[in-house]
Amino acid sequence: MTLQQVMSKTRKAIDDYNMIEDGDRIAVGISGGKDSLTLLDALAGMRRFYPKKYELCAVTVDLGFDNLNLDKIKEMCDKLEVPYYIAKTDIKEIVFDVRKEANPCSLCAKMRKGALNDLIKANGCNKVAYAHHKDDVIDTLLMSLMYEGRINTFSPVTFLDRTEITVIRPLIYMNEIDVIGYVRANSLPVVKSPCPADGYTKREYVKTIIKEMQKDSPDVKDRLFAAVLGSNIKGWAKN
């Protein structure tokens, strides 16, 4: 997949859900993974021609693991002319060393989100772009059904009342396999998560279930995503 193709899918999502307005200052949440780097590349490229003018910065919450090296991502941001800000935290120490959480993901996510929102506000941003793609939409739908007993997934656009930050998700039309192909073709500097819980989450379990479903129904992910688009789930009605 080329940058032009990625930008085309990104722009369609942005236009369908009015994600960007003139004068927006958008923080791109950078985890170091393939998805966030693809989103950064797309939004940086779109600045040249998108009719609504916006500013970008990239933001990362450093959880405090010693083996996290973000130098290559900093180089990428410099090349794209996108300012890069890092919030150093002691989340790792609190979650794993002090509290010794048996299921650390929930507390870690809550603390990480708080640190990220503080970083976003400190740098004058009114929006943050998360790199959730089509597969994430589907995974979240099934997790909600299995673990909460309700039909739900995250919205393309969410306004956070407490922080007055708007969350946008411009990659919702991108398949994960296409993101993987783009990252490999363009040698983006992916940084593996140093978290010891990485790869052992409920989300990974749901991904495994979907892979099994695809053996009998190869198009199951497309049908699940179509169900989201045709549902009454909050935020998914196109503007």
Image (cartoon, grey):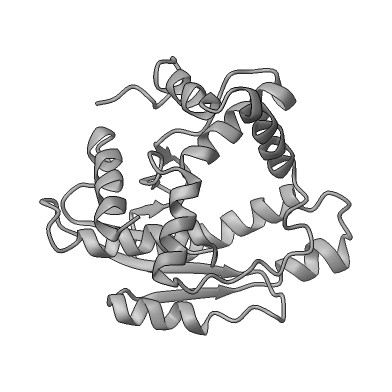
The residue that appears at 78% across and 57% down in the rendered structure is 197
> Splitting the image into 4 quarters, where does residue 111 fall?
bottom right
Foreground pick, 220 / 146: 220
The residue that appears at 86% across and 55% down in the rendered structure is 101
Work out which quarter of the rendered image holds the N terminus and state it.
Answer: bottom left
> Splitting the image into 4 quarters, where does residue 195 fall?
bottom right
**From the viewer's perspective, is 198 left or right of 58?**
right
Work out which quarter of the rendered image holds the C terminus and state it.
Answer: top left
Indicate whether 96 appears above or below 140: below
Q: Position of residue 78 (x, y in %)?
A: 34, 82
Indicate whether 67 appears above or below 4: below
The residue that appears at 87% across and 60% down in the rendered structure is 99
**From the viewer's perspective, is 47 left or right of 123?**
left
Q: Position of residue 67 (x, y in %)?
A: 70, 80
Foreground pick, 164 / 83: 83
Foreground pick, 147 / 45: 45
